[in-house]
Image: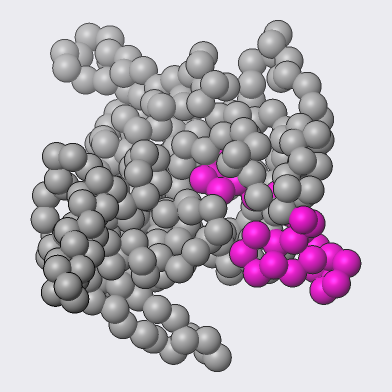
């Protein structure tokens, strides 16, 4: 099953206007695409569900924990931490229980006042949409197929998803065919439990840092190449092998592996060992090592 496409459906269906300021923004239903687009981790959404269902009679933490366990079938879900993380978007105060010291209930009151800035719900502008399609020659940014020649349907995709800190800025938009768009959604759904690691690494300023920090967060596990390409956020969706070679030149040990997935052979990379980031930054360090290597080569051939 693929995660649905909350951003896009929203982008396609939301008219180009600011949300009405007079009405409070309705809370998303626990099973809605809107909530899924904000809260990637299913366990955190389960905490939201419990808060949502107990809006009329808010619960104490112990009871919330019990119900989350009932919903998910799992114990030790760090319910407190997950509830705190929901406060990025929602107003969930701790209300003292009258007459009881140090006991609180947690009512879900609504969106945080500044939630709109964190969640760009406004549609992608029609002009940005047209600009993006034109800039990519009306082709899918991943496979290069076009509606005219290949009969594919193109959708506008956020390179960095909105819920991982991306924006509606044209720099963050690209056309994808429906198939590649679904593949991307599925990839994120597969890595839901690593959402925080993805979020953190995707927003780093340099490509080596983005790839390296992702591998560190998932150290020892085989990380699919497509995930590395996504986090790398490089213009041409290029092969990440060059960047991995750069990291190896900094002393990192990254082991490749291949696995059959239906008819496709997929590539994975596991981080076995890493070095601290050089003070000058990875880009500069890699360039310096490269220059030294060339100089040594020249000396040998002279
Ligand atoms: Zn495609």
Q: Position of residue 87 (x, y in %)?
A: 39, 26
Write the residue at 31% across / 52% down: 208
- Whether the magenta-drawn stretch holds residue 153 is answered as yes
Q: Position of residue 239 (x, y in %)?
A: 45, 68
Question: Dividing the picture into quarters, in which one does residue 18 lie?
Answer: top right
Front one among 197 and 143: 143
Magenta stretch in the rendered image: 137-162
* Quarter of the image with the N terminus in it: bottom right
Q: How many marks?
A: 0
In-image side of 98 versus 45 (left or right): left
Question: Dividing the picture into quarters, in which one does residue 73 lie?
Answer: bottom left
Write the residue at 22% across / 42% down: 281
Front one among 251 and 118: 251
The residue at the far right in this view is 148
Residue 62 visible in image: yes
Q: Position of residue 145 (x, y in %)?
A: 74, 69
Task: Please determine whether, in this image, residue 242 is positioned above or below residue 94.
Answer: below
In-image side of 262 versus 82 (left or right): right
In-image side of 219 versus 239 (left or right): left
- Whether the magenta-drawn stretch holds residue 14 is answered as no
Front one among 281 and 216: 281
Task: Please determine whether, in this image, residue 19 is positioned above or below residue 53.
Answer: above
In-image side of 124 versus 167 (left or right): right
* Quarter of the image with the C terminus in it: bottom left
Residue 70 visible in image: no
The residue at the far front in this view is 302
Q: How is the image coloured?
A: one colour
Write the residue at 44% across / 33% down: 51
Our reading of the magenta stretch's main secondary structure is: loop
Task: Please determine whether, in this image, residue 259 is positioned above or below residue 109.
Answer: below
Write the residue at 64% across / 25% down: 26
Q: Position of residue 118 (x, y in %)?
A: 51, 26
């Amino acid at each position: 099953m693929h995660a649905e496409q909350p951003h896009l459906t929203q982008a396609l269906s939301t008219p180009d206007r600011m949300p009405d300021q007079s009405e409070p923004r309705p809370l998303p239903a626990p099973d809605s695409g809107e909530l899924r687009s904000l809260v990637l981790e299913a366990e955190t959404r389960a905490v939201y569900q419990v808060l949502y269902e107990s809006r009329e009679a808010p619960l104490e933490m112990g009871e919330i924990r019990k119900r989350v366990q009932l919903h998910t079938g799992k114990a030790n879900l760090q319910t407190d931490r997950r509830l705190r993380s929901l406060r990025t978007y929602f107003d969930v105060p701790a209300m003292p229980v009258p007459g009881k010291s140090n006991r609180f209930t947690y009512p879900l009151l609504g969106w945080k006042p500044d939630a709109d800035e964190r969640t760009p719900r406004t549609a992608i502008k029609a002009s940005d949409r047209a600009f993006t399609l034109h800039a990519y020659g009306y082709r899918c940014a991943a496979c290069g197929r076009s509606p005219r020649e290949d009969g594919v349907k193109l959708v506008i995709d956020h390179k960095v998803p909105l819920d991982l800190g991306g924006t509606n800025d044209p720099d963050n938009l690209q056309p994808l065919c429906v198939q590649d768009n679904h593949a991307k959604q599925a990839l994120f759904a597969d890595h839901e439990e690593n959402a925080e690691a993805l979020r953190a690494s995707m927003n780093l300023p340099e490509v080596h840092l983005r790839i390296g920090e992702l591998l560190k967060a998932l150290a020892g596990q085989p990380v699919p190449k497509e995930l590395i390409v996504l986090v790398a956020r490089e213009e041409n969706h290029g092969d990440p092998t060059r960047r991995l070679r750069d990291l190896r030149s900094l002393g990192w040990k990254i082991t490749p592996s291949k696995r059959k997935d239906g008819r496709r052979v997929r590539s994975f990379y596991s981080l076995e060992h890493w070095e601290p980031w050089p003070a000058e930054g990875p880009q500069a360090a890699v360039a310096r090592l490269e220059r030294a290597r060339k100089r040594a080569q020249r000396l040998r051939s002279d």
